[in-house]
Amino acid sequence: MLIGSRREILGGIGALAIGSGVPGRAVAAPRKIGYAIVGLGSYATRQIMPNFAGCEHARLVALVSGTPAKLEQYGAEYGIPATHRYSYANYDRIRDNSDIDVVYVVLPNSLHAEYSIRAARAGKHVMCEKPMAISVAECEAMIAACREAGTKLMIGYRSRFEPYNRLAIDLARRAHVGPTRFITAEHGFPIKPGQWRLDRPLSGGGSMMDIGIYSLNAARYLAGEEPVEVTAVETTDRSDPRFKTVEDRLSFVLRFPSGIQATCLSSYSSAHNSYRVIGTQGWIDMEPATPYEGQSMRIRKDGVVAPRTLPASPKNQFAGQLDHLAECIIGNTTPIVSGAEGLADLRVIEAIYRSASEHRAVTINA
Amino acid sequence: MLIGSRREILGGIGALAIGSGVPGRAVAAPRKIGYAIVGLGSYATRQIMPNFAGCEHARLVALVSGTPAKLEQYGAEYGIPATHRYSYANYDRIRDNSDIDVVYVVLPNSLHAEYSIRAARAGKHVMCEKPMAISVAECEAMIAACREAGTKLMIGYRSRFEPYNRLAIDLARRAHVGPTRFITAEHGFPIKPGQWRLDRPLSGGGSMMDIGIYSLNAARYLAGEEPVEVTAVETTDRSDPRFKTVEDRLSFVLRFPSGIQATCLSSYSSAHNSYRVIGTQGWIDMEPATPYEGQSMRIRKDGVVAPRTLPASPKNQFAGQLDHLAECIIGNTTPIVSGAEGLADLRVIEAIYRSASEHRAVTINA
């Protein structure tokens, strides 16, 4: 589906908008945007798929997996008929399934580009997990493929749909604690052995690709500008069997045009989940900052520290993310976390690796 | 005073030690170690001088200042007779005053070396505020002068005499939250214009020399080893009238031999006072970490965060520091924060400035 069904959907949404304002007048519910999930690992099955239930505009319509038992299990659980279950062998046949509007790629990192590009070539919009890909070149190829196909491309930066993170961004933009001087951001966890994340051909890198990207992305969305230089330091114990092919720990400092410095950590051997925006008059602190749930914010202003709480949100970050791309398709707008956002992170990640390797500051070219 | 009076003091302390264990037996109180304070600025007059009252082995016996009104005011307040009040013109006459055992140098940074060396040449032990001096060469000259004179040299790292900081060091050494992987340390404050701290000829540098040294020193005492490499990033708005000659903000990452990375901040335009030791099983957090009073510790272990409190200490960090050098003189031992400690910080500070200037990692040679 592309032009034809988009018009059809817009009509449906229009009807809903009118209908909901006029009591007693029955209207047809708009058609929800149909998602195919590619890759039935734990993130897809535990975090994404259950959250279609909370979506207004998105629904799960198809599954893609190399494991027949998973297709059987989750197909039955979510009521996905056999006609909408695909293997990697017949993946390209999604082209012929008009129920599928979006392909959500939740595969290991090194497969993101290939499966996103094939989705675009099948005429489908693309949602791709972060990191968008394992190189700038792959990101650029994905963006080009979606542009040529006329499909949307969005990256799964779920924190942008989480209320506390949105509040932190808003407070930072409004200089609530004065103009920002520093950002600190830390993400890490002690990784267990035996995962594809520790296998470079699949992951494309270590903690930075997997969890450090949260520190990087937070630094960028909190600063509201693009870094121009990065300095990175890596520490990896190669005798640790987990780190034969990927890095463990990175510290990196981003320098932004306004003078903001962001000092960030990424780790596969210690637990971190926090950030802080430090302005001339105080700070905005989030710890934990980017979990699936349970964000906690404190603000220090004029010497006084106080917690800041928000009312419970009717829609969680996962449903918010799924609905956002659906709304972008319906309204023909660009996602707030498009391919350009994923590419921007990969540009910095490549510079981080280069800086750590060459022991010098590296300029980031946009 | 040197050998002779040291023996005399040892006798006195010995008598006290025996005496205090034998009720009813009267002994003479030991002679307390006499301090001359050089430089009557706010740190000396508000933090150091009032705290002799809490000392067991140290007393204030002399004052040195270029401002006669200050000598008059504080001389009267502390009962220091005119014979024990000195100007910079007659400073070297302290040699002839046998009440003075220690000269405590609390002058602007660029005067530390000169006044410490002159104190040593007058046969006096030296306590010198941090930063020890403004260059490695000056530190080495101070150490040599005290070695030649046979006098002690201690640097005013007060946090080493503060109970929460001592506990943090102990917990880190015992790997209470697992082996340390990262240390983060942040120190800064928005500086007001019109201070000697902003005048490079007096300060020798900006935030790093004044407040960032707390981040550096904490990283070193929490790691318990010496850094081998540093990477630093500086941001200074030279159009800000405060920062005509000195730096504002620095981020620096220290790499330690065991693999610990310490990411540190120093700022003259935002408020920070915290550190965190992150191990494989949790973290030890201090915020504030190094204030004059009011330290606050939290520990995260096995996923649970809890505050850690200590009973009130009978002796604060200022009295503890003053007594420590007195005890080292009495017992002829080396201070835990000797000239070697001050020199180690200056070695790293010089490397930080070089790294920030050259945009590359700099190896630190011990």
Image: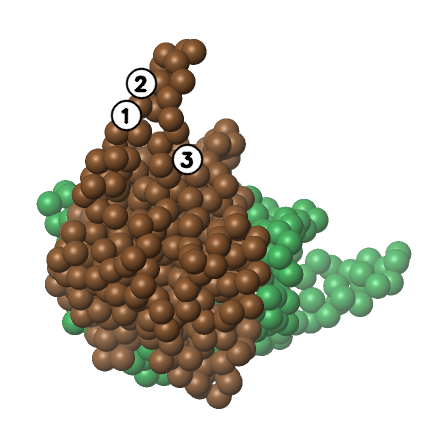
Chain colours: A brown, B green
Helix, strand or loop at mark 1: helix
Do tag 1 and tag 2 residues touch (Cβ < 8 Å)? yes
Answer few, some or many: residues within 10 Å of disc 2's Cα (few below 14, many 20 plus, some between 14 and 19). Answer: few
**How crowded is the residue under tag 3: few (<14 C-alpha within 10 Å), some, or many (20+)?**
some
- Disc 1 versus disc 3: distance between alpha carbons? 14 Å
Q: Which mark is residue A18?
A: 2
Compare marks 1 and 3 and give the one earlier in the sequence: 1
Residue at horizontal 64%, vertical 54%? B304
Say which amino acid is labelled 3.
Answer: Glu
- Label 3 in the same subunit as label 2: yes
Q: Residue furthest bottom?
A: A239
Q: CA distance from mark 3 to mark 2?
A: 16 Å
Q: Amino acid at mark 1?
A: Gly
Q: Residue B187: x percent and y percent?
A: 38, 53
Of residue B233 and residue B121, the one placed in the foreground of this image is: B233
The amino acid beneath tag 2 is Ile
| SS assignment at label 3 | loop
Q: Quadrant of residue A164?
A: top left
Please name the residue that numbered disc 3 is placed on.
Answer: A56
Give the alpha-carbon distance from disc 1 to disc 2, as whole Å. 6 Å
Residue matched to label 1: A14
Q: Residue at x 60, y 70 (%)?
A: B178
The residue positioned 39% from the left and 42% from the top of the image is A58
Residue B45: percent from the left, percent from the top? 43, 44
Q: Foreground residue, B150 or A289?
A: A289
Q: Chain of mark 3?
A: A
Q: Which mark is residue A41?
A: none
